Image (spheres, grey):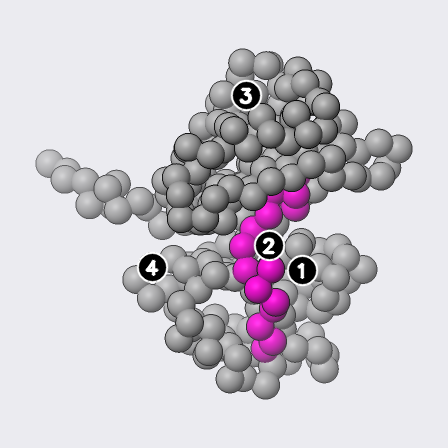
Amino acid sequence: MKILAIETATQMGSVALLEEYDHTLQILAQSALRAHQSHSRYLLPAVDGILSQSGVEVSQIEAFAVSTGPGSFTGLRVGLSTAKAFGSVLNKGVMGVSTLEAMGLAAALHSGLICAVLNAGQRELYAAVFQAQDARITMQWLKDTIVSPPALLEFLYACWKQADTNLPVLVLGDILTEHQKLFEKTDFCQWAPHHLSFPQAAFVGHIAIQKIKEGKSMRSSELMPHYIRLPYAEAHRLTP
């Protein structure tokens, strides 16, 4: 199975082409999108680039995966509309993947508790908490939510005590420096290396392949963003 994965939920977007053959998953090609630039400008050229690099025709791709959020409202729309278009035009399956779950899987070599966070604005965080072992996510302690940093720290401490482990909670993501320092000051949290700060398309594709194998593929029309918080324009829309 060949799958094209798209990640545009944050400023550091990416695309990846993966193939699973004989129970072995391989990344055929991947490319990062330009930071601080519109993903709508660079996404399709990046897709063309990895297809050319790997010698794969778009017609050979069997499914398309995309991160559905939480994350940048504009970025999510770009990725979702692109995946929907590919799936609809080529009559192929699509799969949406949680941005935070993809981040958690990227850090799953850390056996223990993993907390993926992204800046949600209004001094709050998008967050999810996972348990990992043997490079796999084995349990989810907290599903995607929006929370204040102090409340998340309190929850993580409770999880850490309940897990009864000497390993710190690995926290990763792109958040305000002042919020990051709150985690770093504790004796039960460890901040992850910078390369894990942003979600990566390769892990979006990895999760999507597993879901498709479980029969969870969806139609393009079913693919929806997972904002958690309404976009500003919708939240402040005038109503009669």
Q: Is residue 199 magenta?
A: yes
Q: How many marks?
A: 4
44 vs 237: above or below? above
Q: Residue 86, which numbered label?
A: 3
* Marks 4 and 2, how far apart at CA: 19 Å
* Marks 1 and 2, how far apart at CA: 7 Å
Q: Which residues are magenta?
A: 189-205
What kind of residue is marked 3? Phe
Of labels 1 and 4, earlier in sequence is 1
Do callouts 3 and 1 mark residues in contact (Cβ within 8 Å)?
Answer: no
Front position in the image: 181 or 52? 52
Q: Secondary structure at mark 3?
A: helix
Which residue matches tag 2?
A: 103
What kind of residue is marked 1? Ala
Which residue matches tag 4?
A: 121
Of labels 3 and 1, earlier in sequence is 3
